[in-house]
Image (cartoon, grey):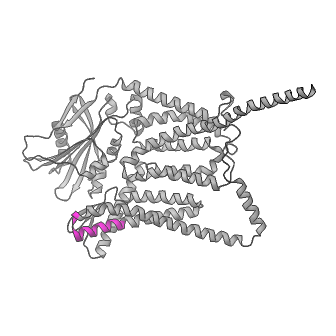
Amino acid sequence: MFLLSEHNIEGRVVSRTTAEMPQASRSLALRPLLTAVPLAILWWTLINHLRIEWSINPQYGYGWAVPWLGLYLAWRRLRTTPTSSGLCPLFPVVRPLFAVLCLLWLPTRLLQEANPEWRLVSWALALQVVALSLFILRKWSRRILFPLLFMLVAVPWPSVIEQPVIQRLSYLTAQIASETLNLVGLPAVQQGNLVELGLGTIGIEEACSGIRSFQAALMVSLFFCGFYQFNGRVGMKLVGTGFILAIVLNAARITLLAIVAATKGMNAVAAWHDIAGLLIPIACFLLVALVARCFADARSEHREQENDGKGQRTMDRVQKSDVSTLCDLRPPTSDLCPLGSNLGSLTPALSLTLCLMAAEAATELWYRAHEATLPPPITWSIAPPREDAAIVEKPLAPRAKQLLRFDETLNASWEESGGRTWQAIFLRWKPGRVAGRLAKDHTPAICLSAVGRDLLAPVQEELVWLPGLQLHALIYSASDPIQGKVHILFCLQEERGAGEFDLKPSSLWEERLAPVLAGRRNSGLRSLELAVWGIQDDEEAKKALLAETRNIIRVDVQKR
């Protein structure tokens, strides 16, 4: 009887323990899932946002490789780096900072939807994703910090930094190429970003300026810094070496194309252009890899010399300690930095998931509610004066189509009896296309500088009033080697306007916040660039441009 009771007692104990085991297993299996969901949402949002720039801008085409390289660096560091303490014990402000980042996600998404081309939003989004990922993965934060920060090399540079760098690199590349050609006996003259040869002219475009090689060299250098785990001093040396190699190789590329043009004719340049453009990044990658390997070998030799005086017992103890701490990938046993008693037992991963889902729903509701009340699109186009027999229409260069990705275009030129020459370029991007972001960075000021023209007067702002349409226009005056001066009127307009929001805002923040408050996103874009030659007086040219703009524009207000 006693044994039976004991058996029953043991049976009940075993039965209770067996019932608790599946619940514990489910808890262990649920925790990685709760951690993976917010990380997937964060990184999908960021990569989906950046992929447009990676696709339409050849300058950032290397961005497609950055997430995979970052994952490899994280995997490598988790395998080979000892476990370290997380962020929570080190930073007392981690909980309020985590809450602030969660709350900032909604305004960032609202700004992103209305301003997909605004690179400040791209950086805000990327920094929030990196910071929130560190909070969620706090146990491995020190080991994955560099791989997460490595993702920032794929974020487009702000225009205030990128454009001066492009212009400087273009000028420097043209200067090096022209000097090199003169040294080898081929006459060449530099005109801004152009290299004039006896048979023609080679232009240093943005893609050829060296900025692509410059940024790719930065990405490759930082990758090898993470691969070999260089310290700051060695890492700076490697990055500097990559920059020098990028500039030298790109100058060699332009010089090679100029030699081909001078010896075989301008038609032969197209055949060599893409080949040289492909070989330069490969050569830069191989050379940076070689330099990084040399730095790593030098570091290994230095460490071996330091370890020569140590005993074998010390070496064995260090190796045993390293092996015991490798690849500890088990999830933490405690909650990840709980936000407070008001959240109960919810972890930050679950809290972040709820915040992200709520932010996405609020963003979609905000824009859908406002888009339903927006006025119908104001469609307009240009119609050159057909009564003039000298009018000529021709398509834009394939390179312009590749860079700007417009959907419709019209390029027309005509002459007047008074000796004035006109050229009008009309471009349109359909609604839902974010490729129009490139149009905002390709103003006449940038294009004129790229072809060696100097602005002769400050840019003037004017409003062009037409029935049912008002355009904000910028008027440029630049030098011309043949006719002395060229005056250009430029305007870029969204199709679905909201009254005064289409006018020139008083500040950058007003320009960016206006479409958010109006609930406008994915609007179509239209641009007009009208140039006139043969007028020397600036005031007379401005009046002629405004009058001709009203003459050639055709407005059609669509009904809802």
Q: On the picture, is 11 further left or further right than 194?
A: right
Q: On the picture, is 251 further left or further right than 99?
A: left
Instruction: Name the residue located 50 percent from the left edge and 44 percent from the top edge.
Output: 126
Residue 457 seen? no
Instruction: Name the residue located 55 percent from the left edge and 61 percent from the top edge.
Output: 235
Relative height, residue 173 to residue 49 (above, below):
below
**Picture coordinates of residue 146, whole percent (x, y):** 57, 52
Instruction: Name the residue located 60 percent from the left edge and 50 percent from the top edge.
Output: 144
**Picture coordinates of residue 173, whole percent (x, y):** 35, 64
Q: Residue furthest right?
A: 2
Q: Which residues are magenta?
A: 251-267
**Picture coordinates of residue 25, whole percent (x, y):** 69, 35
Magenta run includes residue 252? yes
Relative height, residue 238 to residue 396 (above, below):
below
**Picture coordinates of residue 241, whole percent (x, y):** 48, 66
Magenta stretch, overall SS? helix
Relative height, residue 12 to residue 413 (above, below):
above
Instruction: Name the residue located 48 percent from the left edge and 36 percent from the top edge.
Output: 108
